[in-house]
Image (cartoon, coloured by chain):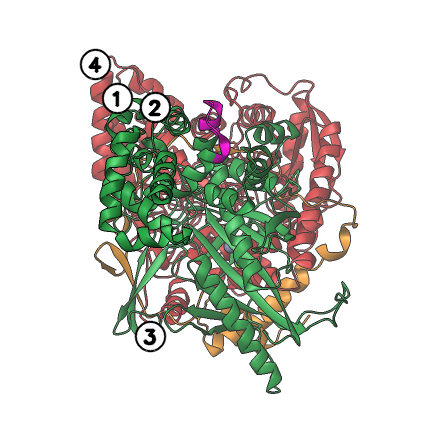
């Protein structure tokens, strides 16, 4: 970004709640399925049907509010937001307006360079999702479609809309915010939060203004530029790309003497650009009013405290604990957290495993295994077994290579590390190793000569040769010792 | 006496004694409808075959000595604003001409569970908006007392059906008088319970914070028995009151000795458009209550005059959103258009009648940017003031009385040109609606033209009992013949016994 | 209070009602008259009077999420549809984005 400009970004994130039923009906709430297979008369907005609030959705809203340090409103209500659109069965959306269930709060993020930043949360409110229309025609897009088909499976799915303050200043901050919010939602277990599938959706309000002079912050009252709302980003990466594109576009507009227009823009993933979706018009008039079909939501302090007591350890606290209790680096803590391996680490440590060793194995081999197989390691590996494996390495029974093989066998369900150790055990017998060393020196005469000439770096190739020849079972200490002896005494 | 002139209570007794079968009772009413509905226009849909099958089932179960519900074999008319599973439900609108709900409204399900026999669906003002049933998109509905006059509205069909001996019991809905006013002008008993007593689930919504189902009967006991069946907590309606419903029949014979009856001063002042005959009949019935031992007190509802204006902001505002769903996408009428939004606008233009459009427009305007506080917000504050008025009045009185409406039945077409004049029919009905109070209309006399006059009785919240007790005492004391009579009246049922 | 024909057309657009010119001209004075009558409410209540949304106050009416019901069959869902295709509601092309 040209340093003459500063971006001002606020995010609106919608989270589909993983409740059993929809927001206002007892219809099963689940993703996908054939069109119109998860629709009741309430979801279809048939005449005479009425909404009844899903108590668990309220509980989840309060959970997220507490996790974001929000004020929980002692009384809030549902409003109708009126506009005509075929995805919306009643042509109004039941949402919250002037008194959302969760008021101001904040979310702390850590950037790649390790700096921390606090982003204000304006509100979290409850609402219902809309159905989906498929546009049929040559392009498959809304423009040029001949007709559309409407499926109401998603209509009425409970949503939380979390609105941030315009405190975000870069694509990186926005990405960190979304990643952190997603981690919190997952930790709370209130949504599967899949950006690709739309169970978590993020819109960005982006504007620019002249950058403050070096060392000076903007006055709090400094006006923001005209903002554009960007939609249709379905990954953290797209969010970053879309924001960066939009910032550049707005700077170009301003620097060529134009004005940024208030509008909604669509992010085109393939083209890597945003384009006008819809101008904000004066016709936007949602005629909000309290939904007379519903009554006040007034969570008692006792209920709020009950919910607070069920809150799990939140991601920030977990990562801080990994750093402070297990002496992990912040990066390792993030990796372990993101791989969902913290519970396994905790279990391993509680079984007597060394935290640093366990973290290294988890962050490398085990996280790689998860990535390859797409399965969570916890289903194959217990903390007790990982602790056992670490102690077999520590007491010299297994070399690293052998331990890797034992781990692979454990993950394949072949047995426990103790049972499998024998077949991959480390060889420390000097005569046995010396025989292999002789063979390797013969094969790699050049390398051996270099070591004799004082080039110790060449030693690595010889050690590697011995390890390969012993399928990783040779005790590396013994190998090093014997090699050194042979190449200096000869 | 013919079966159709008997009350539900009498029919229940006769069927229990096996003097008459449910099939005979139902057939007699279907015959009466067949013979006279071309004059009343009370019905939009008849489900005669189903009704006879249901009656047969009641008779079979009775002969097997199975336990039957409290309305076993009693013919019931259902206002077409209530969803009936598998039976067309139009709310009197072209926009729902062929709509068949896949579910029953809770009040309808309650009638079925009580073994009541549903004869069909009755005529009404489109989406319950009106006071004459002239806003029905389907047919003219006429008053059995004078077929050149309106039966009131919006539940005009349900009122005409009971007054015309098509059924001893019917269901209606009352948002701002739509049960009480037609009851008043057709000489029937019409009851609206406390808001939240009867479930709104499956009532096609007009104004959600006001809509309430209720009953019509020719006697207080019949209307109360029907009310008993439809009331009760329903978890499908968030505004349904989670409280047990007392036995409404309990106090019906207790009389009014010592009861404090509050006459609402603001309703008795008369004024432009108020017929002297109405005030006279109301005064006469108050004297009878006095003679029966009630303590008559004058009470005031100083903010009552703001009720109607508040109502004409709240009800259209809620209606404007409630009626947004009729857009040609999922059910009901569709008029083609090049784009979806053009299709929606064309469908709504063709499917809604003039009064519905007018109210959608008022409501949309009142909610639009910049007007919410001045209109809807203020109207909700007026509601508070009216509730406070009622609280003060009920500190002085156990039940309130006054006229149900300013006039007796008016002529077809008399008020269609002037919406405000039509709205004024509900000036006395609306305050109780805004305050959620139970209220009813009881026939207490006739004007000079021989047309029935209704007395409105209003109870405190959840106080249906004291209201019904007062009405029953006065009904017994007056002992009126409520068979429509007069030069243009519907012919009375033949006297031959079935 | 006066309402111009354009005011009426604007409201009709919000309400998704395709009114004829005749209807617009008829409605302008009618709406103005009704709103003028309704305006009686605007001065009567003092600022400290709280609004009432329902006469019988209720709060925290919640449904138990563990009670799941059987949805309608897709055939039932589209049973009343003016136009249907593959168990979905078919509508003419949609112009514009919802929000
Ligand atoms: Mg939004
Ligand atoms: Zn939203």
A249 displayed left or right of A476 = right
Crowd class of label 2 (few under 14; some 14 to 19; many from 20; radius 10 Å) = many
Tint of chain A: green
Tint of chain C: orange
In depth, the one of B56 and A78 nearer the eye is A78
Q: Earlier in the sequence, mark 2 or mark 3?
A: 2
**Do the residues marked 4 and 3 share a common chain?**
yes
A197 displayed left or right of A316 = left
- Farthest residue, direction top: B65
Callout 2–callout 1 Cβ contact below 8 Å: yes
Crowd class of label 4 (few under 14; some 14 to 19; many from 20; radius 10 Å) = few
Residue A409 is a magenta residue: no
Residue A18 in sight from this viewpoint = no
Q: Earlier in the sequence, mark 4 or mark 2?
A: 2
Residue numbers of the magenta segment: A346-356
Q: How far apart are the alpha carbons under marks 4 and 2?
A: 20 Å
Callout 4–callout 3 Cβ contact below 8 Å: no
Residue C84 in sight from this viewpoint = yes
Please report the residue visible at 68 percent of the width from the left and 21 percent of the height from the top.
B259
Q: How far apart are the alpha carbons under marks 4 and 1?
A: 16 Å
Crowd class of label 3 (few under 14; some 14 to 19; many from 20; radius 10 Å) = few
**Do the residues marked 1 and 3 share a common chain?**
yes
Q: Chain of mark 3?
A: B
**Residue of label 2:** B11
**Residue of label 4:** B64
Callout 1–callout 3 Cβ contact below 8 Å: no
């Amino acid at each position: 970004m040209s340093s003459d400009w500063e971006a001002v970004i606020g995010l609106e994130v919608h989270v589909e709640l993983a409740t059993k039923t929809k927001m206002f009906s007892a219809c099963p709430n689940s993703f996908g399925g054939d069109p119109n297979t998860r629709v009741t008369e309430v979801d279809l907005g048939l005449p005479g049907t009425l909404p009844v609030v899903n108590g668990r959705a309220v509980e989840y809203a309060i959970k997220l509010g507490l996790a974001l340090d929000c004020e929980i409103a002692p009384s809030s209500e549902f409003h109708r937001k009126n506009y005509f659109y075929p995805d919306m069965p009643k042509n109004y959306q039941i949402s919250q307006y002037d008194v959302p269930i969760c008021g101001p709060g904040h979310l702390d993020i850590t950037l790649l360079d390790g700096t921390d930043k606090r982003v204000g949360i304006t509100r979290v409110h409850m609402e219902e999702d809309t159905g989906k229309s498929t546009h049929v025609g040559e392009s498959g897009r809304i423009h040029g479609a001949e007709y559309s088909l409407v499926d109401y499976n998603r209509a009425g799915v409970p949503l939380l809309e979390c609105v941030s303050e315009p405190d975000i200043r870069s694509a990186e901050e926005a990405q960190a915010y979304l990643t952190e919010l997603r981690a919190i939602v997952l930790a709370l277990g209130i949504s599967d939060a899949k950006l690709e599938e739309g169970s978590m959706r993020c819109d960005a309000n982006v504007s620019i203004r002249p950058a403050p002079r070096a060392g000076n912050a903007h006055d709090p009252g400094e006006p923001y530029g005209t903002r554009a709302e960007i939609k249709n980003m379905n990954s953290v990466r797209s969010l970053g790309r879309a924001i960066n594109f939009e910032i550049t576009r707005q700077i170009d507009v301003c620097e060529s003497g134009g004005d940024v227009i208030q509008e909604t823009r669509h992010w085109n993933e393939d083209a890597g650009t945003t384009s006008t979706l819809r101008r904000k018009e004066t016709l936007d008039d949602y005629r909000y009013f309290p939904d007379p079909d519903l009554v006040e939501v007034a969570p008692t302090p006792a209920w709020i405290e009950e919910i607070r007591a069920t809150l799990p350890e939140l991601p920030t606290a977990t990562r801080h604990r990994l750093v402070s209790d297990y002496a992990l680096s912040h990066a390792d803590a993030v990796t372990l957290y993101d791989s969902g391996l913290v519970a396994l680490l905790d279990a391993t440590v509680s079984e007597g495993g060394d935290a640093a060793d366990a973290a290294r194995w988890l962050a490398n081999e085990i996280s790689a295994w998860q990535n390859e197989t797409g399965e969570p390691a916890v289903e194959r590996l217990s903390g007790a077994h990982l602790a056992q494996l670490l102690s077999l390495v520590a007491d010299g029974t297994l070399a690293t290579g052998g331990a890797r093989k034992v781990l692979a066998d454990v993950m394949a369900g072949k047995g426990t590390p103790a049972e499998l150790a024998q077949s991959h055990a480390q060889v420390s017998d000097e005569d046995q190793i010396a025989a292999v060393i002789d063979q390797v020196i013969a094969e790699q005469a050049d390398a051996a000569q270099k070591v004799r000439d004082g080039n110790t770096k060449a030693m690595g190739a010889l050690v590697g040769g011995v390890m390969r020849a012993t399928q990783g079972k040779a005790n590396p200490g013994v190998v090093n010792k014997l090699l050194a002896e042979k190449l200096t005494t000869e | 006496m013919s079966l159709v002139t008997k009350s539900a209570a009498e029919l229940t007794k006769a069927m229990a004694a096996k003097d008459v079968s449910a099939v005979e009772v139902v057939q007699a009413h279907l015959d009466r409808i067949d013979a006279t509905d071309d004059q009343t226009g009370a019905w939009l849909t008849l489900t005669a075959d189903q009704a006879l099958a249901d009656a047969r089932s009641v008779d079979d179960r009775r002969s097997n000595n199975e336990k039957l519900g409290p309305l076993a074999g009693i013919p019931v008319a259902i206002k077409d604003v209530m969803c009936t599973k598998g039976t067309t439900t139009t709310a009197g609108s072209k926009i729902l001409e062929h709509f068949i709900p896949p579910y029953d409204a809770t009040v309808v399900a309650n009638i079925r569970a009580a073994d009541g026999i549903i004869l069909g669906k009755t005529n009404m003002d489109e989406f319950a908006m009106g006071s004459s049933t002239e806003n029905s998109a389907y047919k003219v509905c006429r008053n059995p007392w004078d077929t050149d006059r309106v039966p009131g509205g919006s539940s005009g069909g349900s009122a005409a059906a009971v007054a015309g001996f098509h059924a001893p019991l019917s269901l209606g809905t009352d948002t701002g008088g739509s049960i009480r006013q037609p009851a008043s002008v057709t000489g029937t008993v019409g009851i609206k319970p406390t808001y939240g007593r009867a479930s709104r689930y499956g009532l096609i919504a007009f104004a959600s914070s006001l809509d309430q189902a209720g009953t019509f009967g020719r006697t207080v006991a019949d209307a109360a028995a029907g009310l008993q069946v439809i009331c009760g907590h329903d978890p499908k309606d968030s505004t349904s009151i989670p409280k047990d419903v007392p036995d409404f029949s309990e106090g019906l014979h207790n009389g009014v000795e010592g009861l404090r009856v509050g006459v609402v001063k603001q309703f008795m002042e008369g004024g432009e458009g108020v017929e002297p005959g109405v005030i006279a009949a109301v005064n006469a019935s108050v004297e009878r209550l006095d003679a029966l031992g009630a303590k008559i007190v004058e009470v005031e509802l100083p903010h009552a005059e703001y009720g109607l204006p508040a109502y004409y902001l709240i009800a259209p505002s809620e209606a404007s959103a409630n009626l947004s769903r009729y857009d040609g996408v999922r059910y009901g009428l569709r008029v083609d258009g090049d784009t979806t939004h053009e299709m929606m606008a064309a469908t709504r233009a063709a499917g809604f009648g003039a009064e519905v459009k007018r109210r959608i427009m008022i409501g949309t305007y009142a909610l639009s940017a910049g007007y919410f506080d001045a209109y809807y917000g203020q109207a909700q504050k007026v509601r508070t003031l009216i509730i406070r008025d009622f609280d003060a009045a009920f500190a002085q009185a156990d039940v309130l009385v006054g006229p149900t409406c300013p006039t007796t039945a008016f002529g077809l077409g008399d008020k269609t040109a002037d919406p405000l004049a039509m709205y004024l029919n509900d000036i006395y009905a609306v305050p109780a609606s805004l305050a959620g109070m139970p209220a009813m209309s009881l026939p207490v006399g006739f004007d000079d033209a021989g047309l029935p006059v209704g007395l409105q009785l209003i109870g405190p919240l959840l106080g249906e009992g004291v209201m019904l007790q007062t009405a029953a005492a006065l009904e017994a004391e007056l002992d009126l013949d409520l068979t429509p009579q007069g030069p243009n009246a519907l012919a009375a049922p033949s006297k031959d016994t079935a | 209070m006066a309402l111009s024909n354009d005011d009426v057309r604007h409201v009709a657009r919000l309400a998704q009602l395709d009114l004829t010119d005749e209807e617009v001209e008829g409605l302008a004075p009618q709406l103005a008259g009704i709103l003028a009558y309704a305006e009686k409410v605007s001065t009567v209540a003092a600022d400290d009077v709280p609004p009432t949304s329902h006469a019988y106050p209720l709060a925290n009416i919640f449904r138990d999420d563990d009670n799941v019901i059987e949805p309608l069959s897709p055939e039932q869902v589209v049973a009343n549809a003016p136009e249907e295709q593959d168990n979905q509601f078919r509508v003419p092309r949609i112009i514009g984005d919802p929000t």
